[in-house]
Amino acid sequence: MHIALITGASSGLGREYARWASDHGGYDQIWAVARRRERLEELAAELSTPVRPVPLDLTDKASITQLKGLLDEAASQDKARGEKFSVGLLVNAAGLGKFGTYADMTCEEVDTMVNLNCRALVDVTQVALAHMERGGRIIQIASSASFQPLPGLNVYAASKAFVRSYTRALRFELRGRGIFVTAVCPLWVKTEFIDVARQTANGQTVRHPFPVLGARRVVRWSMLVNAVNYPIATCCVTGFLMRIADKIVPAPVIMWIWEGVRRI
């Protein structure tokens, strides 16, 4: 069995990647991972490819053990039938952001961001790679926020910088294995992210996020970029310019520019 494993599949980018996998991937099954089972069942009813709902809270370390057990069990069952089990596509789209400075955040909020955006992403990648082979594809959702420090969005931006750096190093480590790895670094995307990000003590730290991209555009563009094994997909001209600016403009200058932009 050849599967697509997608975290954060209940909404936003994760849901859109599941649609892409169903329409274009040629996978036998899509394993959709998220906390909300009812959303996963809705997704299963929507797609033509069979969907296996995997309701897990990835902020709980035990969920990784459960996921590993499910993957290993499926591989053993296929082996017993004389078949091969493989993860053909891994999309780590589960993530969380919160608007606010250090003074607006609780320890629980910042811990959850780091836990989900960094630790869970790496753990899921580790257990999935044990079942990946040549031709496999890995999509890690980072952000254009990863290109510079962002006061008022500092922990989220730092966590996505981790994702981008980790993904680039992983891609290098996987050279020769025929597994294509891409960090996706879009601008704001039309998802539930912004509404959730505002649920803090100071949700107006970033007043009007713009420009905003459609989830379908981000998914289609990133899959094209991944198909040629390019490490970074910015998905728009503005994101590309931010990536270039990170290389030539001093961080303090960028932070002062951002300080004005976020207040508009």
Image (spheres, rainbow, N blue to C red):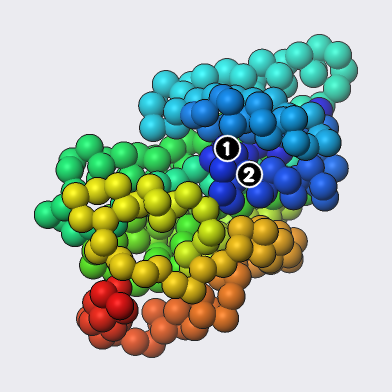
Q: Measured from the top left, where is residue 46 in percent x and y?
A: 75, 36
Q: Quadrant of the N terminus?
A: top right
Q: Is residue 244 above or below residue 159?
A: below
Nearer-the-camera pick, 243 or 72:
243
> In the rendered view, does 176 fall on the left or right side of 99?
right
Q: Measured from the top left, where is residue 19 in percent x and y?
A: 73, 46
Q: Measured from the top left, where is residue 33 in percent x and y?
A: 58, 32
Q: Quadrant of residue 260?
A: bottom left
**What is the distance, in whole Å, between disc 1 and disc 2 at their CAs?**
6 Å
Q: Measured from the top left, where is residue 223 in percent x and y?
A: 70, 59
Q: Is residue 120 above or below residue 186?
A: above
Kindly tell me whether residue 185 is visible in this rendering: no
* Residue at the spot of label 2: 15
| SS class, disc 1 | loop
Nearer-the-camera pick, 256 or 1:
256
CB within 8 Å, label 1 to label 2: yes
> In the rendered view, does 33 fall on the left or right side of 84?
left
- Name the residue: 53% across, 32% down: 34
* Residue at the spot of label 1: 10
| SS class, disc 2 | helix
Disc 1 residue type (three-letter): Ser
Q: Quadrant of the C terminus?
A: bottom left
- Name the residue: 19% across, 50% down: 201
Q: Residues within 10 Å of mark 2 (few under 14, many from 20)?
A: many
Q: Quadrant of residue 253?
A: bottom left
Disc 2 residue type (three-letter): Arg
Q: Quadrant of residue 80?
A: top right
> In the rendered view, does 121 fall on the left or right side of 157?
right
- Name the residue: 63% across, 44% down: 15
